[in-house]
Image (tube, rainbow, N blue to C red):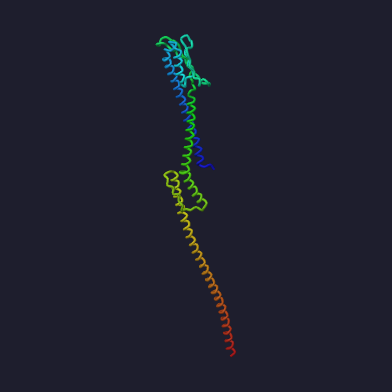
Amino acid sequence: MQSIKQKLMVTLSLVSCVVMLFVFGFGYFATSAYFDEQLEKEMRDTNQALSIVMQEPIFAYDNELTEDILTSFVAYPHILKIEAFDHRGKAIANAVDQEANASPHDISKAKVAITWEGKKEIGHLQISYLLDTNQTLLSAVKWMFLLIGLILIAALGGTNWFVLSHYVLAPLSRVSGAMYEIAQGGGDLTRRLNIETNDEVGQLADNFDKFVANLQMLVSGIVENAERLAVCAEEIRTHSDNNVTETQMQLSEIEVAVITARSTKSVAHRLKGLGVKHYYHGILDKSIA
């Protein structure tokens, strides 16, 4: 038999996993979208900044200054490579992030025109952006969400186990044990659970105590009536025995009376017979005389 605790723990764990997958999945994609939006903003800001700061170095063909500026921008994590060209397409300088360039990446290239005083184009920049620069952050966010999810599931499971064990299952076990003892015929009807909690379990225990109290009164009444019936039965048996004795005595007396009556009648008949004989003898004697 699967207990309520197991069912609730499994159900809560499944529901928690589903909810957390939904919430954390939504959070992960929202974070990814936010990082992508920030990357696009940084790319636009970088294009605008380079279009301004690179005007004079490219106009003056200052290769050293151009390379220094490009190197400082390549230090940004979202930039892999920057190449500077004059208006004829001739390379002036370039800068590369050697560490990032050592492994394959998802790259997006952008061309930024360099104009002098906003009129004449004096050159352009070829910028290679790293589109996967946020993957490390996203991976960290993913593992952070996973860790938070595991901690929450463990915390919810532990809390659920504690609440169920102490506030639900323990009182229910007491009610079940008391009902089992009553069902087996050896229960103590004077026993009370005395669970004083203001919830459904407390109400169940209170109703159980009332039920046992009513059952105790009923059983007490039955026992009392049974004792009365036993006394009445004993009295009836005693009266019956007395009646039988009296009846037997009366039958004996009647039998004696009948025997006596029969004896008296027999004697009377004999006496009567003797009286007739004497009468005839007297008549004969008188005649002879």
Image x and y of residue 256, in percent: 54, 74
Q: Position of residue 12 (x, y in %)?
A: 49, 37
What residue is shown at x 47% (from left), y 12% (from top)? 92
Q: Residue furthest left?
A: 117
Exactly how many numbered labels are in the figure? 0
In the rendered image, the quadrant that contains the C terminus is bottom right
Is residue 20 depicted above or below 64 in this figure? Answer: below
Residue at image coords 50%, 39%? 9
Figure check: 223 above or below 42: below
Q: Quadrant of residue 72?
A: top left
Q: Residue at x 48, y 45 (%)?
A: 170
Q: Position of residue 81 (x, y in %)?
A: 49, 17
Depth order, front residue of 282/79? 79
Q: Residue furthest bottom?
A: 289
Q: Residue furthest front?
A: 64
Residue 186's place in the image compared with 52, above or below, is below
The N terminus lies in which quarter of the figure? top right
Give whichever of 38, 207 is nearer the camera. 38
Q: Is residue 54 left or right of residue 279?
A: left
Query: At which x and y percent is residue 184?
Result: 52, 51
Which is nearer the eye, 137 or 91?
Answer: 91
